Amino acid sequence: MPDIVRQPGARLTGQVDARLAKRFYPGPLANLRRSYNAFHAFDKTHAVALADAGLIPPEAARAILAGLREMEAQGIEAVRDRMGGGRHSGEAFLTEKLGANVAGWINLGPVTVRITAHDNGGAALASISYSATGSQVIPLTTIPLVTPNDTTDVSITAQGVTVVSFQATDANGKSSPIQTVTVKLDSTAPTAVLSPGPNAAGWNCCSSAFTITGSDGLSGVATIDYTASGATILQNTVNGSVATFNLNEGNTTLLFSATDVAGNPTSPQVQVAVNLDRTPPVLTAGSNPASANRGNRTVRVNVSGTATDALSLINPASGSYSVKNGANVVVATGTFTISNGAYGFQVNLSANTRQTFTITVKAKDQADNTGTAVTTFVIR
C-alpha cells in the first residue's frame, strides 16, 4: 500500500519538513491504533520544530501544543478514533478545535508527495500509479518499480488545492484501493488596504472610524495586525479579514498587515500616515452698513470677517455666501477667497421694502469640514 511524505511545510501534521520526514504505513484501523502514540509524539515534536525554525508563529505552536495536551486528557485513542482514525486524525482534531489556521495549508512550496509501496508479504510489487486533479492536473501515470519499497515523488507546484490519487499494483495484477491526499499550497502574500482614504489634500474628515480589509484569493485571511502611533496609540490583532477602529484627530501613523491561513503575511507591511480633522473652521461675519432706511434704491453692503482652522488650516478658495430676504427667498449668491485668515466681499441689496436680509457665509478647511457664520442687513 502506498504512503505519503509531504515536504516542506509550514502547518502541522502531514506537511513534513524534509529534516523531519517520517513514513506512516497505512493499514487496518487496528494497525493504525498501534501507531497513535507515535503519531501524537511526532505532532508535538513537529509543532516545536516548526516554531523554532520560524515557520509558524510561537503563539500558533502554543495553541497546537495546548490542543494536543487536551487530546491526551480526553484519551489519544478515543479522540483519534472519533476523528476518523487516519494518519491525519490529530490534524483533524486540531482543525476542529483551533479553526482553519491549522487546516493543512502549506506556504513553502513546491510540495513533494512521496508514494511508497509495500508488498505486505504477497506477490512482488510491479508499479505505482498516480494522478492529480484540482489546481494542478496530472494525467494517470504509472511508474514501474525497480526494487521493493521503491518510492515515487510527485511534485505539486500549482497554487491552490490539488488532490493526488494513487495506488500500487503487484506482479499478479492486483491493485491496492485508490487513496488520496489533498495538498493545499499558498505561497502568495495577502493584501491589506485602509479605508476611507484621504481627500486630494491628504486629509480625512467627518468620521473617526477606519477599516483595514485583508484580501487573499487562496487560503483566505486569518488575521489583521495593526499598530498606531502619534495622535492615536493602538496595537491589536483581529481574527478575520476586517479590522475596524477609531482614530483621534491629528496625525497618526498606521502600520498594518494581513496574514493568511497558510501563514503568509503582507510583505512589506503597509504604512499609512492618517491626517484626521473633524472640527469645522471658525468663521466670523459682519455687515457694513448694518442697516439702511427704506427707499427706492439699492444699497451696497460690505461683508467681512475671519476664517481660521487650527488643524488642517483653511482652504483659501472655499469661501461662499448666500443672501435670503425677509420672505426666506435666496436673492444673491457668490464666492470669495480667504487671505491670511480674513475675507471680504460686497453685495447689492434692494431697500424698497422694510425687511431683514440674512447673509450666510461658509468656508471649508483642508479636510473639507465646513464652518458657517451669519450676519444681517436691516431695511428700516
Image (cartoon, rainbow, N blue to C red):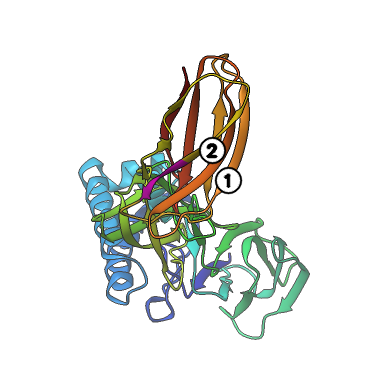
Q: Is residue 97 above or below residue 201?
A: above
Label 1 close to label 2 by CB (< 8 Å) = yes
223 relative position to 181: left or right = left
Residue 241 visible, this orientation: no
In the image as oriented, which residue stretches furthest toward the right?
Answer: 139
Quarter assignment of residue 110: bottom right
Residue 126 painted magenta: no
Q: Is residue 208 above or below residue 358?
A: below
Residue beneath disc 1: 335
Q: Is residue 305 magenta?
A: yes
Q: Residues within 10 Å of mark 1 (few under 14, many from 20)?
A: some
- List the residue tagged with mark 2: 321
Q: Position of residue 45 (x, y in %)?
A: 28, 68
Q: Secondary structure at mark 2?
A: strand
- Left or right, residue 182 beside residue 238: right
The three-letter code of the residue at mark 2 reads: Tyr
Q: Nearer the viewer, residue 340 or 129?
A: 340
Mark 1 residue element: strand
Farthest residue to the bottom: give it: 146
Whether residue 221 can be seen here = yes
Q: Position of residue 56 (x, y in %)?
A: 35, 67
Q: How many marks?
A: 2
Give the residues in magenta.
Answer: 303-308
Q: Residue at x 49, y 59 (%)?
A: 192
Q: Earlier in the sequence, mark 1 or mark 2?
A: 2
Query: Looking at the rendering, in which quadrant would you find the N terminus?
Result: bottom right
Q: Judge by depth and name the residue closer to the eye, 322 or 207.
A: 322
> Mainly helix, strand or loop, the magenta region?
strand
